[in-house]
Amino acid sequence: MRRVGAAHRRFAMLLTLAACVVTGCSGAPGDGSAADHAELRGGSIAKNHDLSGGEFTVASKEFTEQKILGKITLYALRAAGARTSDQTGLSGSTIVRKALNSGEVDMYWEYAGTGWTQFLGHDKPVDGEQEQFRATARQDEERNEIAWLGPARFGNQYAIARASDAPGPAGEVDRISELKGLSQRHPEEMTLCGASEFLDRELRSVQRTYGMEIPATQVTQNAFALNFVNVAKGSPCRFAEVFTTDARLESLDLRVLEDDKGHFTTELAGLTMRTETLDKHPELAGLADRIGDKLTKKTMIKLNGMVDLRGQTPDEAALHFLRSNGFIGG
């Protein structure tokens, strides 16, 4: 049984996360969310990369990890002498990709599996995360004139989680394959929370892979951040969509179910842009490689935790990453 102190800490964390979803979290005192010109130009990016005269609009999707990646890119471009416009926080893969294709934005970080299935139309992934990235990059360039730079050294991945101390039959489920039996023997326990993109893109296929069916009345669509809050308290769902790089898995004591049929694949992140942008500014490839090489899974979990657990801003997390790697001064 969990000790009272741990339960109180988790309850406090739930309240904090719920408040962040509703109102947004402010930055921590003393860690400014902006960097002046001298600081940006004081590190290795300014020394090794020159994008003077370049003007770029940087985008991202709406969840924490994406916002941080977008802000890292914005500040890195400024450090290299470019002018930037901020379009981070757009809602969903489809909207951001359309903006990239149309020229409304110039670049954003995308995941290779998303590119392979959603934008290239494949049903089955390629085995191996590096192989998947290379296949996606090659076909997207050939078909759509979209370049994939990097990749980063981390791969985000969908997963399904429950509270580690979930009561009753739900607390006995450790593998996704076991959800089928749960839905048959205890259908009232088979409740799931998910954000709109997961429910639209993944829910049907994961049910097909595992031969199970979750009634639509037992699926709750909510903001991604609420998945963690809701599944931790067990209401309105016993299970929820999560990302494997999210620091809230540990802070809220969530258990990720084993994907025993390998449905979800690791999706390496790459900086995507139109090939005409890269042709005009080939220096972007080297910059993306250097940044991507420092973006490990451990690093990404830490950066996500700065925002989702400590209440700092994506700007602060991005600047911390750039400073700690010597990319900028400070």
Image (tube, rainbow, N blue to C red):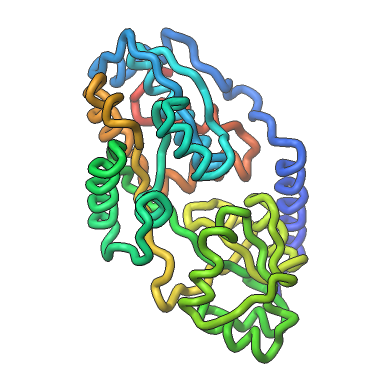
Residue drawn 55% across the image and 51% down it? 247
- Residue 261 sits above or below residue 265 on the image: below
- Closest to the observer: 320 or 213? 213
Left or right: residue 22 versus residue 265 is: right
In this orientation, which residue lies closer to the viewer: 286 or 271?
Answer: 271
Above or below: residue 166 compared with residue 172: above
Seen from the viewer's position, the closer of residues 132 and 31 is 132
The quadrant where residue 198 appears: bottom right
Q: Position of residue 271 (x, y in %)?
A: 35, 37
Q: Nearer the viewer, residue 256 or 159?
A: 159
Residue 328 at x, y percent in the picture: 38, 20
Residue at image location 61% in from the left, 44% down from the top: 308
Name the quadrant containing residue 204.
Answer: bottom right
Residue at 34%, 24% (x, y): give it. 327
Q: Position of residue 179 (x, y in %)?
A: 58, 81
Inspect this view and state whether residue 293 appears: no
Counting from the top left corner in percent of width and height, residue 200 is at 57, 59
Query: Relative to residue 252, is residue 108 depicted above or below?
Result: above
